[in-house]
Amino acid sequence: MDLNGSITFSSSSSGSTEGTLKSGETASYTVSYTITQNDVSSGRIQNTVTVIGSSPGNTNDVSDISDDGDDTDGNTNNDPTVTQLVVTKLLEVTKTAIVTDINNNGINDIGDAILYTIKVENKGNVTLTGITITDTIKDGVGNILTLASGPTFTSSTSGSIQGTLISGEIATYTASYSISSATFTSGKVENSATAIGSSPGNTNDVNDLSDDGDDTDGNTTNDPTVTQLLVTKQLEVTKTASVTDVNSNNIVDNGDIISYVIKVENKGNVNITGITIVDILTDGSSNTLSLTGGPIFVSSTASSSQGTLISNEIATYTASYTISLEAASSGSVINSVTVTGSSPGNTNDVSDVSDDGDDSDGNTINDPTIVDTSSDDIGLEVTKTSKITDNGDGEVESGDIITYNIEVKNIGKTTLTSVTINDILKDGDGNLLSLSDGPFYTGSDKGSREGVLLAGEIAETLSMWVI
């Protein structure tokens, strides 16, 4: 180590010239030194002075080695003057990521490349050496992944070689990962890097775990770099029906067979597993029915096993119902299916209720599959009675009111719909007359709305004519 110039004489307490000291006299000298980075790395500067002089008639017979002037340190004689330097040893690692959309579909998905940039900065005041990078990359469910490349050293701001950083220097490394199908279905990629280095005189005593470079997320240090993958989870179920006219009478009735085809499509971009089907079958009177067969798994377009669908795959199931007399008499057989499945890392979080496949009915989603039925046992019975309200003269004449009560009874075993009344009124000469009021619906004994009659139900209407 070299001082900044030579030792300079300042003064003496009795005014002697440089190099001479009377008895009891004290001389003062000054000298300076500029601290280097190597000095900081060493942690301290140690300095001693040796003074030699000659007594009368002698040469260089008197000498002393300097003391630091601090006897409180336990050393009262000839200890060096030590300047302790403040040593800070600190690494800071930041890891950022960008995604290259390899397939140009606008989302982070299978086959796309995640490109990582790792910045390692020496934020201390000593040189660090032997710096190594350990990279940990995981998918959204914690599985360990393998980088496609890197980490690879690219440069440093002060030109240091790989593994060395002087104070304030930043080294840049790069790495990459190609998103696999399994990783994509997990929903995200988490990546972190640990940098380890050695300060002067030590081994691997300085380290840091990477931060993602985004302090706006509320985590300002050591949070992993997360790449979110766009996951959509969606099932779509369609159920269609066809009827086999077993008795060849050209109507859908007792004994005929309804064959159902159920299509379950995975319209999301992750695999769905644990798929189950719940089938609900009722007649037109809301009575619960039981399928004759199924649902039975038939096949899937990508050959997945029953209960599993990869993205865009369609599974086909079949079921059947043989129409009972009661179901035929109810006027319809109503069927819907609820399908439930699990996305990666979840349980039963994806579901859909079947649509009938006919959007021309004005209902484009989740409407039941309805088969209208008939019965040989159908019929109506109409009874019409009248009552005259006299105007007070005791005779049936002009101004009297005839009130007609019409009872319509469903004498069959099938629910009837679109029931209408056409009332014809004539005089004694056959001339057509017009009702003064009505007919208007007054209700039914089973509470059905106008135009509907359950088996055995009676509906009533009223009409009036003023003579």
Image: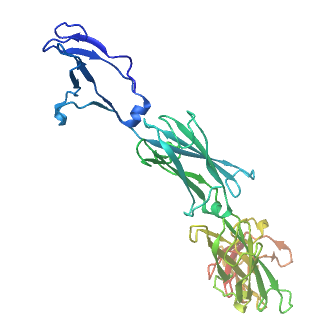
Quadrant of the drawing holding the N terminus? top left
Residue 97 rendering spot, x and y as whole percentages? 60, 47
Identify the coloring. Answer: rainbow
Q: Nearer the viewer, residue 177 or 465?
A: 177
Furthest residue toward left: 24
- Residue 91 point in image, percent of width and height: 46, 42
Please say whether residue 157 is visible from this viewpoint: yes
Left or right of 403? Residue 434 is: right
In this rendered view, identify the residue nearer to me: 152 or 16.
16
Q: Nearer the viewer, residue 173 or 31?
A: 31
Residue 405 vs residue 125: left or right? right
Task: Residue at 71% x, 88% y: name it.
Answer: 293
In the image, residue 73 above or below residue 195: above
Which residue is located at x 57 percent, y 62 percent? 144
Q: Position of residue 321 (x, y in %)?
A: 73, 87
Q: Position of residue 152 (x, y in %)?
A: 62, 47
Q: Quadrant of the C terminus?
A: bottom right
Q: Nearer the viewer, residue 332 or 467?
A: 332
Residue 60, quarter of the rendered image: top left
In the rendered image of this protein, does residue 278 appear above or below residue 329? above
Q: Residue at x 77, y 92 (%)?
A: 255
Residue 382, quarter of the rendered image: bottom right
Q: Which of the 4 image quadrants contains residue 313?
A: bottom right
Indicate left or right for 139 with 397 as reference: left
